[in-house]
Image (tube, rainbow, N blue to C red):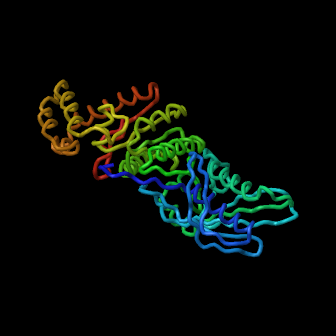
Amino acid sequence: MNGKTLKYGFTTGSCAAAAVKGAAQMLRDQTLIDEVDLHLPSGDTARFPLHGCRLTGKGATCYVVKDAGDDPDVTNGCHVHATVEIDLFTKHRILIQGGVGIGRVTKPGLALKVGEWAINPVPRRMIMEVVKEVFALRCVPATITITISIPNGEELAKKTINERLGIVGGLSILGTTGIVKPISTEAWTATVDTSVNVALACGSDTVVLSTGRSSELAAQLHLRDNGIHLKEESFVMMGDHFGYSLESCHLRKVPNVVVAGQFAKLVKIACGHRQTHVSSAELDLAQVAGWLKESPGLKHLEPLAREANTARHLLEESGFSQGLIDLVCRKAAETCETVAPGLPVRIFLAGYQGEKLYFG
């Protein structure tokens, strides 16, 4: 990006599994260690330094400092703790539980059942694998209890959409490959899928896909003021991933969809961009100018569209022309029909002061 090679990082799932492996080895050997090697689901092997290592009466504990690389992740630098305890001559089983800073699932539609700790399936499998690896030769029946915790997890979770998804009390232990890719499209689109699943599981018949927080807030305010009370789960932040998000709703047969954005983003959608951060504004505005040229009553805005610096500049200089707004929103609706044929979609245009400029 911009000539810089971005650094990959590790998921909370990898950090948890590495901490568990370290604690398990210390418990087995009754000696402290300072690092472990972990095989990741991606096929790679990574080395994790261990911190806070100590032995207890019937267990061991340590933590891994999460390194998210160059990904803008709120969990970067957090301490993922693992405590492994063993009770000999008891039922043969491995228990995985959450501690301080780990959330619990309270809504359906996630990969975990309601009531379970928010430790996702792949991290759970990674933890099970390292425990079985470390205690492979154990013959005495025993219960092994693994507790994962993140001391400031509850505070960090406030900066995520966990609560909206129904994960309360802390963070989730996540990851499918074990690796965090910088500015990960995969992570964002996976969140979109999960959010749509949760909305449907909570009984929502409408999903509002917004390009950003400002357009989401504007849509929430307008709908509420007009007697349309949607559940919190109905609002899904799609960011720049318009095409993927609409297809996600189409695949899951969402009954009604609202695409909410400010003018610049809707211009990009109107121009057919599935990713609203791609393509230059200059090319988009040239396309808008072409539409204006062919539109009765709007031809006078063509020169403005060709000279404007940005889409916002065009909107403001046009005096917030209702004809221009209607044209762009109609074209955006046509793109929605192309991307997801037959999906009922309405367009919501949010003004730059949080007002509604169009909804239809």
Residue 258 is left or right of residue 140, and the answer is left
- Residue 337's place in the image compared with 139, above or below, is above
Note whether residue 8 is visible: yes
Question: 231 and 163: which one is in front?
Answer: 163
Question: 13 and 168: which one is in front?
Answer: 13
User: For the view shown, which residue lies furthest in the right direction?
Assistant: 89
Note whether residue 172 is visible: no
Residue at left offset 41%, top offset 35%: 243
Residue at left offset 52%, top offset 34%: 254
Percent x, y of residue 226: 41, 45
Percent x, y of residue 160: 49, 57
Q: Quadrant of residue 259?
A: top left
Question: 165 and 148: which one is in front?
Answer: 148
Residue at left offset 20%, top offset 44%: 310
Percent x, y of residue 77: 49, 65
Residue at left offset 55%, top offset 55%: 46
Question: 22 and 155: which one is in front?
Answer: 22
